[in-house]
Image: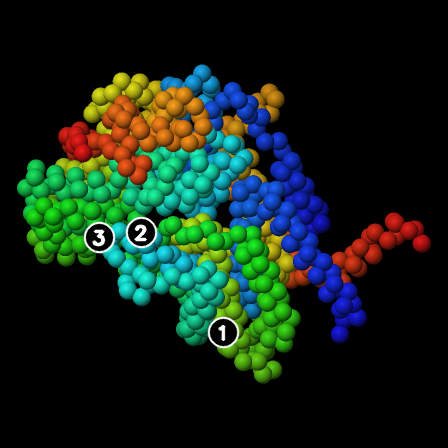
């Protein structure tokens, strides 16, 4: 029995190895590799972004007269797999450009490989400044955390007139720690004061200890730059203990689950985001929203829109370069100016970072409402 | 003394040469993707074989390798990063003084990380081996979590959740396979020595082992510290392969992966750990084709992310039902075994005597 099992296993492996790789026509297609977390801890982001890219591919299936072929590789939300995935896309699928990853840590793991192979890579939502630092071929279509933190601080200080801020930050997420830090720096620079900084971890259910210590400091704004679940729970518990100060958050809050979990307690929460359907003004955005909602039956939101933006920015660069050669596309990407993308106008600035506007969104009557657009 | 000792040594030497030739071939003709998979295989061989020493050979069900790998990875990363790289990575809180200027060659960092991890393992062993069985598993699991939480919070040392990036990709086939062979050699020597027999005695019956005069505490400590040393080295090699580390890399899932490998290979069998490490690492890349869209002539199957994991789970279930002791059980690969096998199956058919 054992021997039989072993031989079956060996045989199946041999079949796997000898199975023919996809018959891609080398000259007639433009191959775009996608590495996203389709399973694992942050699978939700990967799946949303992939849906956005697919919708974008439906809108614009060709570039330079060639068909665009998408190759999806799952990273299991893991760094080792992310590095494997990028190597695989480049060496096995011979892709011309890469879209990915959804989160910063995994993008950093894949970046050196693409950089070395001279294949341009565009991340939809990796907001950590370290992602593109010192990399020639790595770009992104989202704004970076320092910008978001600065704009949040500016809005809170100027428009809400807050002077004493308290922060509740998720220490297990690089995104949250970065954002909280850049907010605090800018807020202090403007003349405000951080009266309390408290910490929590992803998955925490109880924030009353942190909120009580914040309450003792009497802040006039509470900044919670965490993901939606933690933001919603913190808001609920703040209301329970009677901490009635406005709550401000970051783009991690933009998920329908925020309102589902938070209910009436997240009413009035304001956050900085990448994209809001109602604020979308470009031609491409209108086309995209119609296509995405027809294809998936869901409402278009930040993550899928940025996935689609990554796709459109790459295609635009290929058209301007009139080539799919890695180096030429890279140069064109670096020179992206006033590209009318779904999430607003994109300029690629220094270090391959997108310089673009952000939107302020508020929860009103159980819905996300567009508040304002802030330009850099 | 084995009468075939000399022959076996020659065969081992030939085997080593074959591996070196294969690596040379892979280095020259393989793509960077092939090389990466081979490197991953070697790293997981190091981690699985050394984890097997404590879990399989000594029979102490512990769940801490993610802690050891994390300590090794952070130690080596902090030692090999250039002061400039450190300065630009630590954007939130600056790195503390002695670490900010230290920069040593890769080879010394490998030794340093092994030693540091071994010291951690040694210190940790005192509280850990006060308990046995399930409690041991819980204590070690807790230790794994502690290390991860410390890595998250000690921002001036580890850069917190942002992690470290920009490590030089030092890990190549020679480093990874060199250390993999070294690990296998050292641990198989240890297992064959009198210490190894004592460790096995501890596994089968701790009280009986104590009764025949084995100091079980120190033997367990020996296995634990050795395991920690190699896990640490493996961690450093891993860090320099993927060139970036952060606390999320060292969650319980890493331990879980290694546990799957050693159980799959057979608890206590070094050969089994090697086979399973290669099988899982290489297999999970090979199986990616099941997640690609397939055209089977008349039907088109859409891509299904996560399908690999389903297949792996099925293999594991089958293995646990039909071969409960894993691929190798507690048996080991030996040249005598191979030659007996060849004589048994090949000779009668060949010469027909």
Q: Nearer the viewer, mark 2 or mark 3?
A: 2
User: In what element is the residue under mark 2?
Assistant: helix
On the image, numbered disc 1 is attached to which residue?
A: B221
Q: Nearer the viewer, residue A256 or A84?
A: A84
Judged from this view, the residue extending furthest toward the right is: B353
Pick the quarter of the image with the C terminus of chain A: top left
Q: Which mark is residue B89?
A: 2
User: In what element is the residue under mark 1?
Assistant: helix
Residue A244 visible somewhere in the drawing: no
- The residue sitting at 49% across, 70% down in the picture is B225
Contact? badges 2 and 3 (CB < 8 Å): no
Badge count: 3
Q: Chain of mark 1?
A: B
Contact? badges 1 and 2 (CB < 8 Å): no
Q: Nearer the viewer, residue B120 or B137?
A: B120
Q: Chain of mark 3?
A: A
Above or below: residue A374 compared with residue B341: above
Mark 3, residues whose alpha carbon is within 10 Å: few (<14), some, or many (≥20)?
A: many
Marks 1, 3 in one chain: no
Q: CA distance from mark 2 to mark 3?
A: 30 Å
Task: Say left or right for B309 vs B245.
Answer: right
- The residue sitting at 51% across, 20% down in the picture is A28
Q: CA distance from mark 1 to mark 2?
A: 37 Å
Mark 1, residues whose alpha carbon is within 10 Å: few (<14), some, or many (≥20)?
A: many
On the image, numbered disc 3 is attached to which residue?
A: A207
Marks 2, 3 in one chain: no
- The residue sitting at 58% across, 63% down in the picture is B182
Task: Say left or right for B94 vs A55.
Answer: left
Task: Say left or right for A23 vs A193.
Answer: right
Residue B344 visible somewhere in the drawing: yes
Residue B185 location (% of width, % of height): 62, 65
Q: Quick one: label 1 or label 2, which is nearer the N terminus?
A: 2
């Amino acid at each position: 029995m054992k021997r039989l099992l072993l031989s079956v296993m060996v045989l199946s492996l041999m079949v796997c190895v000898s199975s023919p790789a996809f018959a891609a026509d080398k000259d007639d297609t433009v191959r775009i590799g996608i590495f996203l977390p389709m399973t694992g801890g942050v699978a939700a982001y990967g799946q949303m972004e992939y849906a956005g890219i697919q919708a974008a591919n439906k809108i614009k299936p060709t570039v330079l007269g060639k068909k665009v072929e998408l190759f999806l590789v799952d990273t299991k939300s893991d760094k080792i797999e992310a590095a494997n995935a990028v190597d695989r896309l480049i060496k096995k699928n011979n892709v011309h450009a890469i879209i990915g990853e959804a989160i910063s840590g995994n993008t950093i793991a894949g970046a050196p490989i693409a950089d070395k192979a001279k294949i341009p890579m565009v991340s939809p939502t990796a907001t950590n400044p370290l992602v593109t630092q010192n990399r020639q071929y790595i770009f992104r279509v989202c704004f970076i955390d320092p910008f978001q933190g600065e704009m949040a601080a500016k809005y809170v200080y100027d428009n809400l007139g807050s002077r004493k801020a308290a922060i509740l930050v998720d220490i297990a997420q690089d995104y949250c720690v970065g954002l909280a830090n850049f907010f605090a720096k800018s807020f202090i620079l403007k003349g405000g004061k951080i009266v309390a900084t408290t910490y929590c971890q992803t998955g925490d259910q109880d924030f009353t200890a942190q909120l009580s210590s914040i309450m003792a400091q009497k802040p006039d704004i509470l900044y919670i730059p965490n993901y939606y679940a933690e933001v919603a729970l913190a808001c609920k518990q703040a209301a329970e203990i009677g901490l009635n100060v406005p709550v401000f958050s970051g783009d991690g809050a933009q998920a329908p689950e925020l309102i589902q979990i938070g209910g009436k307690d997240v009413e009035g929460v304001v956050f900085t985001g990448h994209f809001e359907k109602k604020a979308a003004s470009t031609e491409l955005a209108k086309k995209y929203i119609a296509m995405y909602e027809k294809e998936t039956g869901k409402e278009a939101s930040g993550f899928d829109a940025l996935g689609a933006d990554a796709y459109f920015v790459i295609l635009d660069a290929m058209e301007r370069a009139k080539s799919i050669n890695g180096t030429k596309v890279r140069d064109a990407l670096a020179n992206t100016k006033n590209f009318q993308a779904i999430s607003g106008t994109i300029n690629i600035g220094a270090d391959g970072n997108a310089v673009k506007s952000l939107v302020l969104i508020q929860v009103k009557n159980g819905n996300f409402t567009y508040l304002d657009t802030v330009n850099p | 003394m084995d009468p075939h000792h000399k022959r076996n040594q020659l065969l081992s030497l030939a085997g080593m040469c074959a591996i070196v030739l294969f690596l040379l071939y892979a280095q020259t003709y393989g793509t960077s993707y092939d090389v990466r998979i081979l490197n991953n295989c070697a790293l997981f061989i190091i981690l699985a074989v050394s984890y097997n020493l404590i879990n399989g050979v000594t029979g102490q069900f512990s769940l801490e390798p993610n802690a050891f790998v994390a300590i090794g990875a952070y130690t080596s990363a902090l030692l090999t990063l250039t002061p400039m790289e450190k300065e630009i990575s630590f954007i939130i809180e600056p790195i503390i003084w002695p670490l900010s200027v230290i920069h040593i060659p890769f080879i010394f960092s490998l030794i340093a990380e092994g030693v540091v991890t071994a010291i951690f393992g040694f210190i940790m062993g005192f509280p850990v081996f006060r308990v046995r069985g399930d409690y041991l598993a819980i204590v070690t699991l807790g230790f794994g979590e502690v290390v991860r939480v410390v890595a998250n919070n000690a921002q001036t040392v580890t850069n917190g959740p942002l992690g470290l990036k920009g490590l030089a990709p030092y890990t190549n086939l020679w480093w990874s396979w060199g250390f993999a062979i070294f690990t296998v050699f050292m641990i198989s020597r240890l297992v064959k020595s009198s210490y190894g027999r004592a460790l096995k005695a501890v596994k089968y019956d701790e009280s009986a082992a104590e009764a025949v005069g084995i100091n079980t505490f120190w033997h367990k400590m020996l296995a634990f510290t050795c395991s920690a040393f190699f896990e640490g080295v493996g961690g450093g090699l891993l860090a320099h392969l993927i060139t970036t580390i952060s606390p999320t890399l060292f969650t319980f899932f890493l331990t879980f992966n290694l546990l799957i490998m050693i159980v799959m290979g057979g608890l206590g069998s070094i050969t089994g750990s090697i086979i399973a490490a290669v099988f899982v690492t290489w297999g999970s890349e090979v199986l990616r084709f099941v997640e690609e869209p397939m055209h089977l002539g008349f039907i088109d199957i859409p891509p299904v992310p996560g399908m690999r994991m389903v297949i792996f789970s099925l293999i594991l279930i089958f293995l646990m039902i039909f071969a409960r002791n894993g691929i190798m059980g507690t048996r080991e690969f030996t040249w005598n075994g191979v030659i007996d096998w060849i004589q048994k199956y090949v000779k009668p058919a060949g010469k027909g005597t």
